[in-house]
Amino acid sequence: MDIAIIGAGIGGLTTALALKRRNIPFKVYEAAEELKPVGTGIILGINAMQVYHQLQIENKILTAGKKVDSINVTDFKLSPITETLLLPFEQKFGHKSIAIHRAELHHILTDEVGKENIVLNSRLSNAVKIDNKHYQLSFENGNKANHTFIIGADGINSKIRKIFFPDTQLRDAHQICFRGVTRFNLPPIYKNELIEGWGQGKRFGFVEISEGNVYWYFLVNQNLYQKHNDLNIYLQDAPEFVREMILNTSKEKWFTANLQDLKPITEWQKDRVILLGDAAHATTPNMGQGACQAIEDAYVLFRLLEKYNPEQAFESYPSIRIEKAHHIVNTSWKIGKISQLENRLLMGIRNLMLRKTPQSTQTKNFERLFTLNHVN
């Protein structure tokens, strides 16, 4: 009995580490020819850090990243709309939220999983069931491999999903996202804070991910960007340091994407094949929960495999995870629309309503976010 994990992203490697901690044989197959530092920043919420505590790598992440003390939404001039202090949640759950470079997290996971367990240059071309117990994986390089179980952790454009669960649909958010990491000295009041500034059909965000290194992002509605594809125009009314932080980042280091998600699907498991992470529930990044939800998927498998054999674990996993994952996808989609309104009257009403939202409502929402799924 062994398990093939397709994809060596955060979800795939966290799952591999969970299997390693349970002494279950596995192999990770990754399309890339080498594991090199890529990506920008990532927020590991208190939910994700609870998982990494149980997988015994929390301290390494705390050392490599930067603690986030609050999550603040502002207008485009940095006037507050909502402020969420994370200390009460740290005290309740016993863990912190951490901002970290994606490459640093990937390095920690790769070291823990072991490079000998990761097969590179293995872009999947097909997977078929060859008997009652085995699947054969075929790769574009001509190699083949047989495994008893398959975990598809191969992202929003998952090949495993296309093979075993073909009736799925991606949704276009009609927003363009720019991301980058730069050396920058933030004003002291913004240290240890995740800030998101909402403008007219646009928004920016930033957080320090290590001493002197800032992860920033900027989003603009597609219809606006088609008229003017110069970020200088959209940043004219942003605070000077925000303009400087973004525009002084070398464009070669920018990551640009048209935002999409996966329209929620209810089938994540077929026989001994499951989907995990973005392959199962790709979300827009508006709640900072994409990777966190993949990490939670790995946690549920980790807990199930403590009590059940892999076949039973695979069967139980979707019913435990689907409700929360779909809640994240749907809520994130709504936030994306609300945060980038273009009508100034609606923007004003939105800001007023958010400012009047009771703290108890915010607390309830974050507690739901940070609470891990219970596994019987």
Image (tube, grey):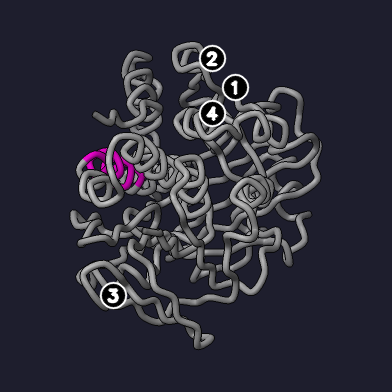
Do the numbered discs 4 and 2 sit on residues whose CB atoms are within 8 Å? Answer: no
Residue assigned mark 2: 87
Rounded to the nearest angstrom, the CA distance separating label 1 from label 3 is 43 Å
- Placement of 132 over or under 302, stated as above or below: below
Q: Tag on residue 149?
A: none
- Placement of 6 over or under 218, stated as above or below: below
Q: Residues within 10 Å of mark 2 (few under 14, many from 20)?
A: some
Q: Quadrant of the N terminus?
A: bottom left
Q: In the structure shown, which secondary structural element does the residue marked by tag 3 occupy? A: helix
Between 149 and 348, the residue placed more toward the observer is 149
Residue assigned mark 4: 53
Task: Tell me which amino acid carries mark 1.
Answer: Asp
Do the numbered discs 1 and 2 sit on residues whose CB atoms are within 8 Å? Answer: yes
Which stretch is magenta? 320-332
Circle 1 or circle 4, nearest the eye:
4
Give the residue drawn at x 71%, y 50%: 181
Residue assigned mark 1: 69
Left or right: 357, with 40 as reference point: left
Circle 1 or circle 3, nearest the eye:
3
Rounded to the nearest angstrom, the CA distance separating label 4 from label 2 is 18 Å
Q: In the structure shown, which secondary structural element does the residue marked by tag 1 occupy? A: loop
